[in-house]
Image (cartoon, helix red, strand yellow):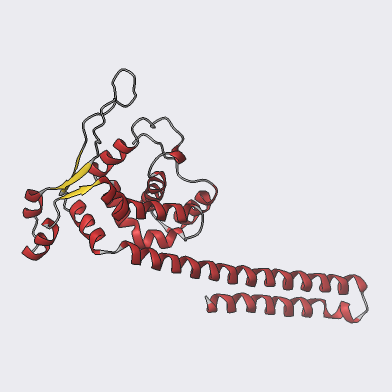
């Protein structure tokens, strides 16, 4: 960055010297037009340079703030419980147990049954045993066999929702989010049991506006990361970032 800034400064310096040398004879003859032109030109160059320096400093401050947020998100995300859930999902050993339907098929309203029905997840022992992991990691994954929907929300999916919200509001930089979390975002979102859980939570709101449904910001940020993955070169990535700065990716409540 410092070399880049020095290069810009040298362009302004040598450009100004070249203009002075070109108009020097006319300037000494007392040509008011060219002396006024030189003054305006230098004032314009100087103002543009100050704007550029201010922009660079603001960008640097923004990147520093974003990096601080990413550091805090890392600290909150990479806990033992979250790592365990990620490992189970990556091993395809975490299965969603869908609750019995508590909705009336005719009216679409909840039944009068007072029984509280909650979705939960179960760790599949056979899937864990079939992995090539050593015995100690296997034992660690098998210490807890059941996870409630609240566990999944608090330990895992809530983090992704917060990351998407912060990026969507330009509080954290997308490139930093992509570098730090894209793999975890995609592995979790692509897991069919996680999708079934989100579908269950969105039941009855498939036609609602996307911003009002659960985990819409998780869906937004993972869609954005997937789009970025498919870009082939830095020029297409640059154009994609410009386009996405004006409009986010298209997502729907029905998944």
Residue 218 in view? yes
Q: Is residue 197 left or right of residue 159?
A: left
Residue at position x 68%, y 75% in the image: 12
Q: Position of residue 52 (x, y in %)?
A: 64, 69
Residue at position x 50%, y 59% in the image: 171
Q: Is residue 172 left or right of residue 143?
A: right
Foreground: 95 or 250?
95
Foreground: 31 or 167?
167
Residue 231 in view? no
Q: Is residue 199 above or below residue 155?
A: above
Q: Is residue 127 left or right of residue 10?
A: left
Q: Position of residue 77 (x, y in %)?
A: 32, 61
In the image, farthest residue toward the top:
106
Residue at position x 69%, y 72% in the image: 50
In the image, farthest residue toward the front:
114
Q: Position of residue 47 (x, y in %)?
A: 73, 70
Q: How many marks?
A: 0
Residue at position x 18%, y 53% in the image: 88
* Displayed quadrant of residue 194: top left
Q: Position of residue 189 (x, y in %)?
A: 30, 47
* Displayed quadrant of residue 253: top left
Foreground: 2 or 224?
224
User: In the picture, which quadrant includes the C terminus?
Assistant: top left
Foreground: 230 or 61?
61
């Amino acid at each position: 960055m410092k070399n880049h800034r020095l290069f810009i400064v040298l362009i302004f310096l040598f450009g100004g010297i070249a203009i002075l040398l070109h108009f020097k004879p006319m300037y000494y003859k007392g040509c008011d037009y060219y002396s006024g032109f030189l003054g305006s030109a230098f004032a314009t160059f100087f103002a543009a340079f100050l704007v550029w320096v201010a922009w660079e400093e603001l960008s640097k401050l923004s990147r520093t703030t974003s990096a601080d947020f990413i550091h805090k998100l890392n600290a909150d995300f990479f806990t033992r419980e979250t790592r365990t859930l990620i490992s189970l999902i990556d091993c395809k050993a975490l299965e969603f147990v869908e609750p019995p339907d508590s909705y009336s098929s005719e009216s679409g309203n909840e039944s009068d049954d007072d029984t509280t029905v909650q979705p939960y997840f179960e760790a599949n022992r056979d899937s864990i045993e079939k992995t090539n992991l050593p015995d100690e990691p296997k034992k660690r994954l098998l210490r807890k066999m059941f996870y409630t929907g609240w566990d999944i929300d608090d330990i895992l999916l809530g983090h992704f929702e917060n990351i998407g919200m912060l990026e969507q509001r330009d509080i954290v930089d997308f490139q930093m989010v992509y570098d730090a979390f894209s793999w975890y975002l995609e592995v979790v979102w692509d897991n069919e049991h996680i999708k079934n859980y989100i579908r269950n939570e969105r039941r009855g709101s498939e036609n609602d506006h996307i911003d009002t449904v659960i985990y819409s910001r998780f869906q937004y940020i993972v869609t954005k990361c997937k789009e970025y993955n498919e870009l082939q070169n830095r020029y297409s990535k640059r154009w994609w970032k410009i386009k996405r700065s004006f409009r986010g990716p298209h997502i729907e409540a029905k998944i």
